[in-house]
Amino acid sequence: MRARPRTDIRTGAPAPRGGPNEEDLPVSETHATDAAGQGAEPTRPTPPKPGPPRPGPRPGPPPAARPSPTPAAVAPPAPPAALPSPVPSAAGDPGRWGRADDDGTITLVTADGERVVGSYQAGPPAEGLEHYAKRFDALVTETEVLAARIAGGGDAKASLTALTALREGLGEAHVVGDVPALRERLDELVGRAEQGVSVAKEERERARHDAVARKEALAVEAEKMAADSTQWKQAGDRFKAILDEWRTVRGVDKKTDEQLWKRFSKAREAFNRRRGSHFADLDRQRVTAKARKEELVDRAEALADSDEWNATAAAYRDLMTEWKAAGRAHREADDALWARFRGAQDRFFARRGEHFSARDTEFAENAEAKRALLAEAETIDLSDPDGARARLREIQERWEAIGKVPREEIRTLEGRLRGIEDKVAAAADAQWRRTDPETQARVEQFRARVEQFEAQAEKAEAAGDRRRAEQARAQAAQWREWLTAAEQAVDER
């Protein structure tokens, strides 16, 4: 069963959790009255007994912002155990700090004087003094519970509020005990709680600063992607990841958080607009590309049955260049158009391949025929130049009639034929030189010129004209070389 709410032993109001329960007090407490009319404080009415507690809220994380809780509200479900207090217990020897008069008046005695704290009519005066000493010990216990909470890293602000309330109410507390020692203890704990509040504030500020810096970095990253990213898929995924991370960053004040959120939201919207514009342009480009490629397909299909092998092959190369420059249509349409374009191209090049395959076979046969003709030409009798020329003309006519040969064999075959043609021509030239009457006349002419210049040289020498003599001898030497060459040519016939 849940404990009944306690009554504050200092003021008579409902007490916060953490102090002594009403069950801890003597039954006669409900009959105790203040010493009214006897020079003491006015009689305080006994507070009404509280009713059954209402069901509390379901457990869960606290809202982001709540009013500062009372000392009772901040107590965890299982408060830490109080440590031994430096304040002495009053219950063991209450007479050290107070007295009970015969009329039931209870007085607190301190170094600063005396103060009536209540009246006890439910039993002997000594029992009343013990009762008010237990009230003091309950305050000490509550104080040490808060001390343990501070030492354990509990909510310093809530503890400070509770400790301050205890200290402020101590001057009028209806208790008997070492009040100065308790006040000193409360002063010490308030100082420690204030230090804890300061540390917690610094930690919150540091956490807030880190959270602001993180959201600032996320906003800057979002703005950069919004401004220049063209990796649409990756950037879109990153925006989603940033949003997920954004929701996990807490501790930013509302004003700053709203400002940063506006920046991120604005960047995301700008990116979405730019991405939408890009894909709208891309759709328009794809429509244009489709129309352009349909035209290219029509032209390709018109060329598929052409027999202009070289010109059409060049035309297909040009069409392919135009195809690549046309851009991409939507995938389904682009694939269908490409299949038509490639089909027309393949049909033409298959026909072209068949044509050149047949031609290569024909050229190979022509090459074989020309090799046979060369073998025949190499048997021409060069001793009969006229017959050799006639035979060569016949072979040349047959050569032309055979037709073309493979490109790689043209030079070899033509070279062999030219070699035979050169031999026939050389034989004809040799015969002509041997039978040419002008050759002998030319030899005699060269000899006469040699003799003429030698005579001129002797005559000039005799006349003492050495320069003309040297010129004549030089000319005679030149003509003698020509004479020697002409005589050798005649001898070789």
Image (cartoon, rainbow, N blue to C red):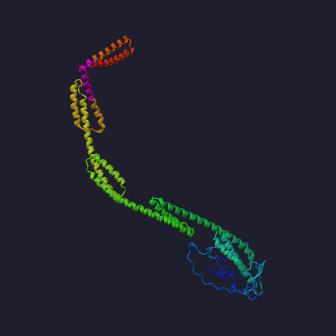
Q: Quadrant of residue 276?
A: bottom left
Looking at the picture, tell me which residue is in the foreground, 488 or 36. 488
Which quadrant: the N terminus? bottom right
- Residue 97 located left or right of residue 268: right
Vertical placement of residue 1 versus 280, above or below: below
Residue 309 visible in the picture: yes
Rendered-image quadrant of the C terminus: top left
In the rendered image, residue 275, in percent from the top left (x then y), is placed at: 43, 62
**Residue 437 magenta:** yes
Residue 302 colored in magenta in the image: no
Which region shows up in magenta?
420-442
Magenta segment main secondary structure: helix
Residue extending farthest to the bottom is: 37
Q: Nearer the viewer, residue 232 or 289?
A: 289
Quarter of the image holding residue 190?
A: bottom right
Note whether residue 330 is visible: no
Q: Quadrant of residue 107?
A: bottom right
